[in-house]
Amino acid sequence: MAEFGLGAYLVEKGVISREQLEQALQAQVVYGGRLGTNIVELGLFELDQLAEHLAALFDLPIAPQQWVEAPDPKAMLLLQRDMAERYSALPLYVEGTTLHVAMLDPGDARQLGALTRATGRSIRPYLLPELRLLYALERHLGIARPVRFINVAKKLERVRRTAAAGPDDRPEEVRLREALGIGPLGQGEDLIDESSFAVLHQRLASAREIAAGGPAGGIEPDVAGADAELLLDDEVLAGAKPRRTDSPVAKLPNDALSLEALLDAAPDRESAGRAAIAIARLHVATAALLVVHRGMVMGLFADGGDLASRIEAVLVPIDADSVLARAAHGEPYRGAPPQGALDVRVLRALGRADAREIAVLPITLRDRVVNLLYVDAGEKAIAETALGALHALTLCVSRAYERLILARKKDQGA
């Protein structure tokens, strides 16, 4: 199933406005995920409605709920985990020589052919929205969701509970957006909402204990709470279950001109981010890209040292007393590793406490900070020429985002 056409379809049907579509496209470029996921996050309609719209647009059936909740064990045995992860496909039921499968792209002939060859069965594809399919893959096959999708799912559950609490005479969009924690359209500080930042199946430390430098606990606090100061996934940071161990830029060119060309032609946020990290690594020992989203700074991906396996565990509120929080408000930092409680904890957890000098540079999109670029040169100071190149890099990333947003708008007929 291609993304092309969903936005134009929803606008044509009067489900969302062109302005709302542009908002969702901007969120998709910066934060990732399918367009439908970002529209649901914005509170424009519910997940069930998204499934119905997708089914109508692409003329494909929605995966039956009972199969999604309890797939046939025989079906599960037919598809190896790595194939299920590669194609975002969940085996549902075996019927003779036919395997029923829920997919993100059930209309993709190449994926269907690959699944047929892998299972030895003809494939009957079903549509399932991204949020539900990723949850089902994690639940049944242990394929971990990115933190972002866990957050969205938990927030939607909060919306469901709010709706079940009793009648409310306010307009549906107002009630939904309040439950999601999003302000009125066009007035909010953030593009889309996040709920508590808790990683499923992993223990998160107590925010207050970590802020005080104390021991990790076994609590899963609600980071939306006003007293949250810092969350780090200690299992990830200890290297027990790293999310990524390979270098995100290992297979990219190592010259600036080629990497700039890749950044300028990047088809999505992840490709742009990886090219940006590779460019930064031409000048420094380590580099990391973090996302600023709904009042939090969250690690995205990194390269150099063992940051690649650690960066995704970082979550810092932007109202905390830290270098990352100040950079999220547009204040760049360059200097010795700061000695504030949160900064010390973050740098120690990332293995960068011994760096001689660090820099944190904001990346803005339409006057809003959406990413942070963290760099250090290890035992050396950061060269002035390197810092100038890194500042230029932040502008190149912003330009790449603008290009992606315009391209998505064109694709969607916005």
Image: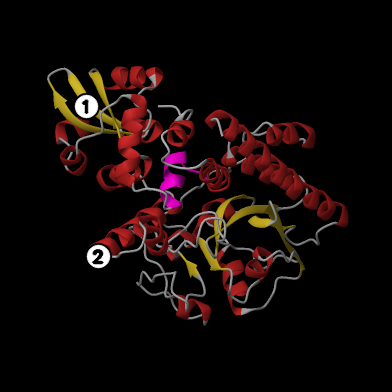
| Quarter of the image where the C terminus is located | top right
Mark 1: which amino acid? His
- Quadrant of residue 82 in the image? top left
Q: Which mark is residue 100?
A: 1
129 to 360, vertically: above or below: above
Number of marks present in the image shown: 2
Question: From where the camera sits, is residue 128 visible?
Answer: no
| Quarter of the image where the N terminus is located | top left
Count neighbours of disc 1 (C-alpha within 10 A) and say few if under 14, some if 14 to 19, many if 20 or more: many
Identify which residue is drawn at 78% across, 49% down: 283
Find disc 2 in the rendering and name its residue: 167
40 to 256, vertically: above or below: below
Question: Residue 130's spot in the image, x, y percent?
Answer: 37, 40
Mark 2: which amino acid? Pro
Q: Residue furthest right?
A: 385
- Asked if the magenta segment contains residue 256, the reply would be no
Secondary element under disc 2, as helix, strand or loop, is loop
Identify which residue is drawn at 47% across, 77% down: 226
- Mark 2 and mark 1 lie on one chain; the one further toward the N terminus is 1
Q: Residue furthest left?
A: 96
- Asked if the magenta segment contains residue 36, the reply would be yes
Question: Residue 206's spot in the image, x, y percent?
Answer: 42, 75
Instruction: Tell me which colouring the rendered structure shows.
Output: secondary structure
Label 2, label 1: how many angstroms apart (C-alpha)? 39 Å
Looking at the image, residue 208 sits to the left or right of residue 50; the answer is right
Q: Which residues are magenta?
A: 32-42
- Quadrant of residue 217 in the image? bottom left
Looking at the image, residue 206 sits to the left or right of residue 255; the answer is left
Looking at the image, residue 28 sits to the left or right of residue 376; the answer is left
Looking at the image, residue 347 sits to the left or right of residue 185; the answer is right
Q: Which mark is residue 157?
A: none
Question: Residue 69's spot in the image, x, y percent?
Answer: 19, 44
